[in-house]
Amino acid sequence: MVLSHPTPRNTRIWKEITHMTKQTMLAVLKARSTPGVELQRIAIPDPKEGELLVKVKAASICGTDISIYDWTPWAEGHIKPPVVIGHEIVGEVIEINPSASSGQAVYAEDIKIGDFVSSETHIFCGSCYQCRIGNRHICENMELFGIGRNGGFAEYATIPIRTSWKNERSVPIEWMSTQEPLGNAVHVVTKAKVSGKRVVVFGLGPTGLCAVAAAKAYGAKEVIGINRGEYRRKLGKSMGCDATYDELPKALVNQCDVVLEMSGNASSFVQGLEAARIAGTMIAFGIPKSDVSLNAGKYLINKELTISSVFGRRIWETWYQVSDLLKSKKVNLGKIITHECKLKDFEKAVAIMKSGKCGKILLRP
Ligand SMILES: [Zn+2]
Ligand SMILES: [Zn+2]
């Protein structure tokens, strides 16, 4: 591994920082254990050993950020304020503090100053059982970028080198920050093996919309989208849905080869089991906010379904697959990026998110 160690600090960052007042940056901070966030000026972080400092170019808002904003029970269990939130980002590398221990699981050996990198949200330990058998995305000691540690809704961010993805410059910057939902979708779709199949996608939020596009790209015969809100059904059509409905039509009960549950609604989970044909496949991705009650005999036994679940992206297999889809333009992420806001207008972006009349919202520092 060859990394130029910028000691003392890389001159480029110093030049930039000295132009700024008191070396501070604007950041969206989960400052307290109550609903809401605060926009604050805080110190620009120093990259620790094994980390990069990036100047954030774009970020996108995720449903998780809204859970944090609303301070849901899930957020309460995962966050210890103060934390800079935001995990879907792209930034330009302006400082590299390489790892001293060669035994650390470093991926991005060739990352250089000036590269555009995105962060994998799941910061793996590299040494637990799951990491050792190639399941780093479900590491037992996982830390979460922008959730358990400071993230990227800020002008600058530090990212561990081992969870940094170096982007191809041919991919638009806006798409670089929106790879996470596509990565989730690609993991879901590849696990389901959709080629030549009739696929039904429950929930057309950004990840569901990406699942529609990915299913088409991986050769699904037909893709049907189910979503209550009309705005996102229209987006579903533009991403490749052959048909969309507000709920499962009777004609599709027991008729779908593959069900992708992306909504996180307990009722959609059961509707998905209804939609699956005998010996069909269902992949659950959306996290239900309430308990799911189902007739196990009817669905799990009699239908002999293959039911599986997905949590995040395989590191780095899924990222390579995403990169191929973006470079070949088989998936156009531009269609789901419906709004853009300044970082300082974060509250406005939250209001748009909550209206449901949006796809991805891009934040520009
Ligand atoms: Zn996300
Ligand atoms: Zn681990």
Image (cartoon, grey):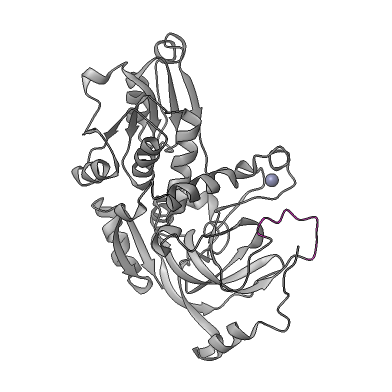
Give ligand 2's quarter of the image: top right
In the rendered image, the residue lying farthest to the top is 302
Is residue 210 among what the camera can see?
Answer: yes
Looking at the rendering, which quadrant does residue 108 occupy? bottom right
Image quarter where the N terminus lies is bottom right
Where is residue 102 drawn, in percent x and y? 80, 59
Left or right side of 344 for 15: right
Say if the magenta span includes residue 129: no
Q: Residue at x 41, y 65 (%)?
A: 37
Is the magenta region chiefly helix, strand or loop? loop
Residues rendered magenta in the picture: 100-108
Nearest the camera: 119 or 293? 119
Q: Residue at x 51, y 36 (%)?
A: 310
Q: Residue at x 63, y 70 (%)?
A: 112
In the rendered image, the residue lying farthest to the left is 230
Q: What is the count of numbered marks?
A: 0
Image quarter where the C terminus lies is bottom left
Q: Compared to 364, does 230 lie above or below?
A: above
Left or right side of 162 for 250: left
Where is residue 106 drawn, in percent x and y? 70, 56
Q: Compared to 271, does 188 lie above or below?
A: below
Where is residue 131 drawn, in percent x and y? 69, 43
Where is residue 76 drawn, in percent x and y? 49, 52
